[in-house]
Image (cartoon, coloured by chain):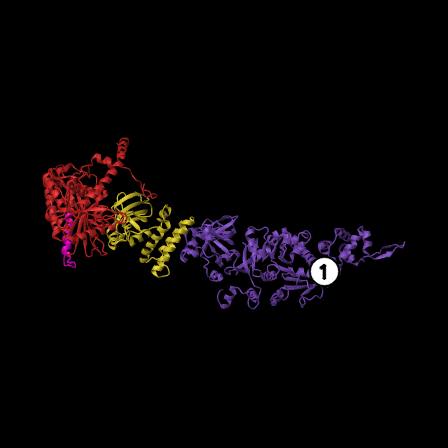
Chain colours: A purple, B red, C yellow
Amino acid sequence: MMDSNDQSMLLDPQSAIGYVVGGGLRENLRVRLTIPAQQVQEGGFVIIESGDWRFYGLVTDLQLGATDPRFADEQSEARLPAELARLLHGQTLFTNLEVLPALMQEVGPEPGTPAYQRWQEEIDLGLRPETAPLPVKTIPPHHAPVRLAGPGDIAEIFGKSEKTGNFVIGYTREQGHPVCLNLDKFVQRSSGIFGATGTGKSFLTRIILAGLIHYNRASVLVYDMHNEYGFDDTASDTGKRVVGLHTKFANRLRVVGLGGGALIRGQAPDFNLEIARRDITPADIEMLTGELNLKETTPTTLDALWTDFGREWFSQFEAMRPGATIENDEGKKVPAPGSVAYWALRAGVNVMAAEGLHSKLGRLFHKEYIVEQPAADGVSEIIKALEAGQHVVLSFGRHEEDLDYLLVSNLLTRRIRDAWEKRTNDFRARGEKEPRPLVIVVEEAHKLLNRELAAQTTFSTIARELRKYYVTLLIVDQRPSQIYDEVMSQLGTRVTGWLGDEDDVRAVLSGLAGRDALRGMLARLQPKEEVLLLGWGVPMPLPVRSRRYDERFWEELLGRSGAAKRSEKDILGELGFGA
Amino acid sequence: MSLDFQQVRQQINALGELAPQRARQLAELRMLAAGLLEHHAEDLDALRQRVHTITRLHDPNLRCALPAIENPEPLNAHCPLPSLLTQATVLAADGSQIAPDRHAEVNYGLINVGAVQMRVGLPDPPVVSVQSRLMYDDDLYTPGGTITEERLSLMRDLAERRRLVELAAVFRAQTNDRSDTGAAAPLITFTDGPMELWGAKDSADSGEFERSLEQYHVALSNLHDLGATTAGYVDKPYANLVVRLLEVASLPESKLAEAKHTHPLQGVLDRELFRPLLALGERSAVFALQSRSTQRYLDDLALHFFYLNVGREGHSWLARVEIPAWVARNDLMLDNLHAVLVQQCRILGNRPYPYLLHRAHEAAVVTLEEKDQVTQMIALELRRRGVEVGEISYKQSAKTAGGKSRYTRRGRSQ
Amino acid sequence: MTQAIQIGRLLRAGTSGFVVGCRVTQLDSPSFGALVKAPAGAGYDIFGLIYDIHVDDDGLVRQLVTAEGVDESVINDNRLNRNVPLEMSVLAVGYRQGGQIYHLLPPRPPLSLDVILLCDPDELRRFTSAGRFGYFRHVLRAQDLPVGEVLAAHVQQAQRAHTAAGDPGWASRATQELITLLRDDYPTLMQVLGALSDMAAGEAVASGAAGIL
């Protein structure tokens, strides 16, 4: 038996692999296979031709069948000569494909016929809309021929890879045709990259970020919790060097380190970020309730602090001395002025609650990147860079605790979103410059976007706002089931690797049609090799062999010299052709 | 109209009543006959004398056996089976006839003679031939009127014997086989039934009969000239010729005049008489045939006969074989005939009958369908020539309109 | 050269077939599964397949076997001289009228037959390649007939005719059609395929090659 991969490479894409025998819109189409089953795989992208229409679908299951169970049970190849057994099996034993129909497109009459001429004219005259792939609303008839998609079909649906804005994310599994993501669509809504630990999410993220940065229609802000994206890294399993985004995009990407004097992977970042105490609001603290194990009394205490001290509340609270007592006139020990208790009594706040809060906030008080007076206004710097069209990777350095991540990313994002909201309003009301789209890349998103925190973080607000203020998220996570489902359902494009947990699978597929069929496909992805493209942002679900993040990737993206690819026009010009 | 079974039943009862007694009587008579046979076994001259006396003086129509003049054998002789021949050729012929049917559309007759020729001892299959002769127009009439069934039978018998002559002549012409003694190779011929040509003698057709008899004699003579053995084979013979001889032999002198009416051994058949006498394959003595009609067969043609046990282990079966004088007096021919007939009968196992006669009969037989076909063929020819064809009689059409059987593939026959 | 078999009598006939009694010397006897042709009028021939050959009881032969040992001349006599009375059952599978072959049941059964002809290879080839094996229906629909055996014998004979004319793929196409027709009738299909494979095995042995099918 020939290696099935070889065989599929030789298959003429135009030749039929089967014909429709049943099924429907809801339950998927059933296709009788006319070629050996090994030549088709789950996830195969197939085309069904039917008169003026073409249907695009995904193979979601393969089933063996027989016209009578006895033909399947009895091994007639033992009883009959080879030729007879072959003829018999050809008619009585078969394989059916289950095909999830995703898109349909009107392709008109046969090219070359007068009917086709008329049809084409109608389109040109505007009497008939230009044909484009639509969500499938009807089905092909019985016996409609089915074939594997060719590169042209894939380009038709997913876009031509030569066109700017189309970024090759991977290749079809059977025949290795390139599949593109449309980056404009990608950033129009929040998106997600999912996969169990070790399935290569960070590599996939790097690839997509490289694409976005290279395309440069939106700015990218990466919360790099584990210092992976900015500078070169080493792969944990192979030990090979992994190129950092800064290495390749030095002129337009800033690496920012958290905390003054921080070094990222031994290198100095472009600048450092320090948080001013006065930038921390009670809301920021309330968001850390779970992390700091704060009590229910916290909001009341914070409220009182804010009333009393305004923006200085954090500094003031930090300055209070817990448990300090003095003796009063009667000789009794009373809270000393400047103590937590002293203030609490004065503010009418429960002393125990206040002292408890103070002690819990101790972790924050000791953070070296929270300072009274930052050396520079790091936040504004970041915002300015982003508005100017640059990209920022905020590396957390050695501050890798969840606490750091939660606090800093939320705080920063809040500021950024506010800035963008203002810009958007100025643009809409007064016709000023349109804000530059921004994509915020959030790792370990389930820490920030779970149900408990849903109401409290800016992230969920952003996710739910869609792109009202030109800001979207790119979520990278391995536990999508922990993410607030309202947020999940708002995600446009989902690129997911293998997921083991049932809940996670369900979460990734939430809000999508054809879930059941895709569920199995998800479970059978090859970890590190394959991903499934899903969601509003892609024309139809498709499993692909993901692209490798290696030298070749960079060559293809940037050209050999590392510069942007030259256009065909340029090349022709250099050779002396064209105007 | 069907039988009145009531009447018949009554008569059967009466018959049954008498049966046991009759059986006992016959058994006694048989014993008596056997005794007489023993008693007179050697008195050949006396027997001949007695018969002559009666036929001359009292009953010229006496029909009985007569000790042969040449090579006479005792009455109770039984001769063992001679050894099987090699180099003998056997010829058998049999005929069938279609009588003119005035009820049919067209009137015609047909005589069909089948003949089979075989060489003993060789694996070659026999050669079968058929001769069909259509009779029409004048053929169908005799001075007495339309041809009768009897006349037709006679013509058939004649045709059979003549066919033997033809084939024998051809055989002799083609082969120069000589036996060890230098004589011509043995050629044994026979037909079914007595050799005597039967036919109406005292009717308007007697002239016809005479002519036919002459032709018959010529045929027999031809066979004699060709050195062939010829015989007539009678299966399950009903004759009582030897018994009659014993009857007249036992008559007292005084009663000779009443010979014609005296049948003390009536009911006893010759074959019953010889059955205990002849072992398997044995033949009885050869007897001459005394009768008015056989007066015509003279000299070489004089008719003789013997009984032959052609049965198999545990089942005796007696046949009567009629032969002409030239065979009776020729020991070699007689033995050859004896051996061939027994061998032929053995072929058919538990129903002994000469195989070649059976085959000849098969060849000669005309089936009803074949007969209809010939009728149709004649009718077609006549119509083609513009000649009117008769209708079948309504009597006939009523007879032939029977049931139908339907074609279905389920059952073989309905 | 068509081999004319003389008919003794037409016993029964209908549109689905007919039964014929004939006397044929054993050398010429027609074979099971053979295609025969019955001319039944001007330019109208009925085609049929022999599905049963039945030798009637022969009284003489019964006698002969009761004797001790049968002489060789007698055996030869019966083999060569005596006309064996055969009863042949023929299943109608089509007809030809006005030069056109149809695989439908003949519109009229034979009424009176003189002669039935064994189709020669050329005629066999023409009949079996007219249309798309429509005549298989008649065989498959029939009951009380050894369907598998009749088809196998017929396919074997037709295949020989087609191979001789340069088309060795006929049997494969015929088998394909049979499988299609019998897809829902497992017992009959396996019976037919069993017969076909036995036939193929026999042919392979006979031809010394690795199967003709």
Q: Pick the residue in front: A104 or B68.
A: B68
Q: Pick the residue in front: A493 or A10.
A: A10
Q: Is residue A475 left or right of residue C14?
A: right
Chain of the residue that carries numbered disc 1 in the rendered image = A
Quadrant of the image for the C terminus of chain C?
A: bottom left
Queried whether the magenta region covers residue B176, the answer comes back as yes
- The vertical placement of A241 against B4, above or below, is below
Are there few (<14), some (14-19), or many (20+) residues within 10 Å of tag 1? Answer: many
Q: Is residue B405 left or right of residue A476?
A: left
Queried whether the magenta region covers residue C120, the answer comes back as no
Residue, disc 1: A275
Q: Which residues are magenta?
A: B161-183
Q: Position of residue B198 (x, y in %)?
A: 15, 42
Q: Is residue B388 left or right of residue A49?
A: left
Q: Is residue B403 left or right of residue A53?
A: left
Q: Position of residue A232 (x, y in %)?
A: 63, 67
Residue shown at 23%/36% (left/top)?
A: B397
Quadrant of the image for the N terminus of chain C?
A: bottom left
Secondary structure mainly formed by the magenta segment: helix
Q: Is residue B361 visible?
A: yes
SS label for mark 1: strand
Name the outermost residue toward the right.
Answer: A330
User: Residue A342's quadrant in the figure?
Assistant: bottom right
Type of residue at label 1?
A: Ile
Q: Is residue B237 visible?
A: no
Q: Position of residue A275 (x, y in %)?
A: 72, 60
Q: Position of residue B84 (x, y in %)?
A: 21, 55
How many numbered callouts?
1
Q: Pick the residue in front: A485 or C80.
A: C80
